[in-house]
């Protein structure tokens, strides 16, 4: 099978054996996978001598089920998420905790973004706000756009900002107020909250010395929250934090279970009554939102490429100002 890897800051296509199915895993024949530019470009730039498998969002058809699999069968469509089990490859060996069944009526390209969907959902769970409260999303790459759409579907008062006018304009829902300058956004926050400030700011931008860590504390209310979602160094001025008794939170990937070898590698789920929203359940929730039309992800799936076009696609996605947010890899060509 073909697989995409990074080595020496270059993207390559290699050949590998199709993995053998095992207990509590399914073998998935990939139909589509989605490039996540924020994480994958960072990994590409950091790649060295050792080959590194790229990607973590995909969907496909179940080719084979291992012993212990009862919720899907051969021929079912599934969305799956989470490296090192999910990447850009023709076949994937996925534990039962990292996939969700996809209804037949759903556009398959949309659920190829299930990893980004789970990450967006988990970020909003970390924010822990109620409907009607004000959520500010700063940085409108594909993840920021996803968070804004899901927050809007949950009846939060959403304010979004990106310095790229093209990216800001992509959020066309009339109830999402979008801005392309921080000054205009600040005016919008003051107007919509009567000067009290937002309940939460979700930072979806990156940067090691970003001024956002200072500015965002001016945008929240007393006892408000900041959630770090992007690759941002958490350098927050203590005086500003103290003045508002601000909560600084960080969102780790798709939810509880991520990076836990018992949950992922051994495919042992957490009890439903103890941890309601695991990584896998967030995947399923994203699939539900898409399948019921609660969020529109069609703008993200317009740029479909063949497997052999992937190296060139990464070069285009290096441009963070580009209106192209992601690319969908088609494995059926």
Image: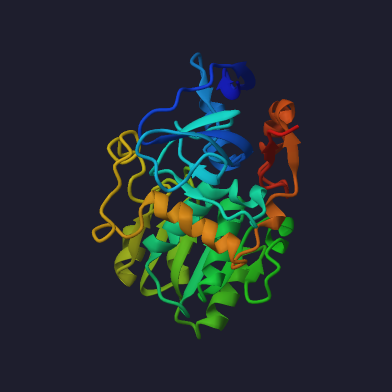
Q: In the visual, does 255 lie left or right of 320?
A: left
Q: Nearer the viewer, residue 230 or 207?
A: 230
Name the image quarter holding residue 124: bottom left
Residue beneath the point at 64% across and 52% down: 110
Q: Nearer the viewer, residue 310 or 107?
A: 107
In the current view of this chain or complex, which residue is farthest to the top?
49
Which quadrant holds the C terminus? top right
Which quadrant holds the N terminus? top right
Q: On screen, 184 above or below 312?
A: below
Residue 74 position in % (x across, y down): 53, 39
Q: In the visual, does 293 lie left or right of 137?
A: right
Tell me the colour scheme of the image: rainbow
Name the image quarter holding residue 54: top right
Residue 44 position in % (x across, y down): 56, 28
Residue 255 seen in the current view: yes
Q: On screen, 163 above or below 189?
A: above
Count the labels in the image.
Answer: 0
Residue 206 seen in the current view: no
Q: Nearer the viewer, residue 318 or 286?
A: 286
Residue beneath the point at 48% across and 80% down: 132
In the current view of this chain or complex, which residue is farthest to the bottom?
194
Residue 320 position in % (x across, y down): 66, 44
């Amino acid at each position: 099978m073909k697989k995409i890897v990074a080595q020496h800051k270059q993207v390559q296509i290699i050949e590998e054996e199709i993995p053998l199915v095992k207990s509590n895993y399914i073998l998935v024949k990939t139909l589509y996978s989605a490039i996540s530019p924020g994480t994958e470009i960072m990994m590409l730039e950091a790649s060295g001598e050792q080959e590194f498998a790229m990607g973590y969002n995909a969907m496909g058809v179940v080719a084979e089920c291992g012993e212990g699999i009862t919720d899907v069968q051969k021929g079912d469509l599934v969305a799956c998420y989470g490296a090192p089990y999910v990447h850009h490859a023709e076949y994937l060996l996925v534990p039962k905790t990292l996939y969700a069944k996809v209804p037949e009526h759903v556009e398959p390209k949309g659920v190829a973004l299930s990893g980004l969907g789970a990450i967006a959902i988990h970020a909003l769970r970390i924010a822990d706000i109620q409907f009607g409260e004000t959520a500010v999303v700063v940085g409108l790459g594909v993840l920021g756009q996803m968070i804004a759409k899901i927050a809007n579907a949950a009846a939060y008062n959403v304010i979004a900002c990106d310095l790229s006018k093209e990216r800001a304009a992509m959020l066309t829902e009339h109830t999402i107020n979008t801005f392309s300058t921080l000054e205009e956004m600040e005016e919008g926050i003051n107007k919509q909250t009567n000067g009290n400030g937002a309940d939460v700011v979700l930072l979806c931008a990156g940067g090691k010395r970003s001024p956002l860590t200072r500015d965002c504390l001016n945008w929240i209310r007393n006892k408000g929250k900041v959630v770090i979602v992007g690759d941002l160094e958490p350098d927050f001025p203590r005086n500003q934090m103290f003045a508002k008794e601000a909560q600084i939170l960080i969102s780790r990937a798709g939810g509880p279970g991520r990076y836990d070898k018992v949950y992922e590698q051994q495919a042992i789920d957490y009890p439903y009554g103890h941890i309601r929203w695991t990584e896998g359940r967030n995947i399923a929730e994203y699939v539900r939102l898409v399948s019921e039309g609660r969020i529109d992800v069609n703008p993200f799936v317009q740029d479909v490429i063949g497997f052999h076009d992937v190296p060139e696609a990464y070069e285009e996605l290096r441009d963070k100002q580009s209106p192209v947010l992601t690319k969908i890899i088609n494995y059926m060509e």
